[in-house]
Image: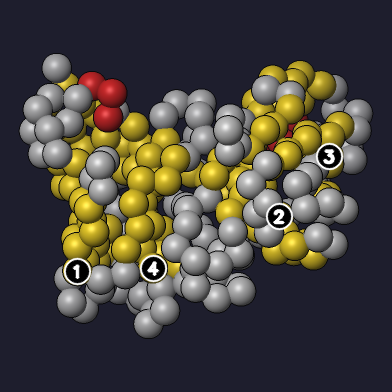
Amino acid sequence: EAQVTQNPRYLITVTGKKLTVTCSQNMNHEYMSWYRQDPGLGLRQIYYSMNVEVTDKGDVPEGYKVSRKEKRNFPLILESPSPNQTSLYFCASSPLRGNYGYTFGSGTRLTVV
Amino acid sequence: LAKTTQPISMDSYEGQEVNITCSHNNIATNDYITWYQQFPSQGPRFIIQGYKTKVTNEVASLFIPADRKSSTLSLPRVSLSDTAVYYCLVGDIGSDFGNEKLTFGTGTRLTIIP
């Protein structure tokens, strides 16, 4: 089944403790992206990648890092999480061109205390 | 990137046709219009995409007038399960840089009433 898999689904952590949220897709998509969703603010893009070793900042990149060493994986790294990073996170992928939509993962609900 | 404007919320009764309109006055020549549906705590799901006139699939129809400054998502005979947030996006998906910064905004919260 074509899908984007995020792990974990839920995570509670403490301020300053480094964490990684994994994202993997099995559709051979070039493009991958991370979003965070907060009440009243909609979906905001954190980082995106147009291919292996190519990443760029979205609208709210502060406090996050990403890497794209393989086409299928696009992990989101929080080096020193803070409470304002408590949010619902989504990973998405799509082909680079053509009239295809994004495929989203099921989400990761992160709480930083 | 073209900015989009949608109603914040809409209510409708079961069995009715629902039309959600999105304004995108600054749409560029190469931009496509894409709609997504999102249920609570789930990732958005692609519904439909179009460039001009009318597009129909098994879920919805998308109407785009000749000037392309707006678009209307039409959901026929809605049911309770259509209660969700609907996002309108505009962007150039036909180039190498088309997908890079598609902005979702806050969408339209559609509530279906029994």
Q: Position of residue B103 (x, y in %)?
A: 50, 58
Q: Callout 4: helix, strand or loop?
A: strand
Mark 1 highlights which residue?
B53
Label annotation for residue A78: 3
- What amino acid does circle 2 point to? Tyr
- What amino acid does circle 3 point to? Leu
Residue at x 41% of width, y 29% of height: B39
Q: Callout 3: helix, strand or loop?
A: strand
Report the chain holding disc 3: A
Mark pair 4, 2: CA separation:
22 Å
Name above or below for residue A94 compared with residue A41: below
Q: Residues within 10 Å of mark 2 (few under 14, many from 20)?
A: many
Mark pair 2, 3: CA separation:
12 Å
Mark pair 3, 1: CA separation:
44 Å
Of circles 2 and 1, the one toward us is 1
Mark 2 highlights which residue?
A47
Label annotation for residue B32: 4
Badge 1 or badge 4: first in the primary sequence: 4
Of circles 3 and 1, the one toward us is 1
Mark pair 4, 3: CA separation:
34 Å
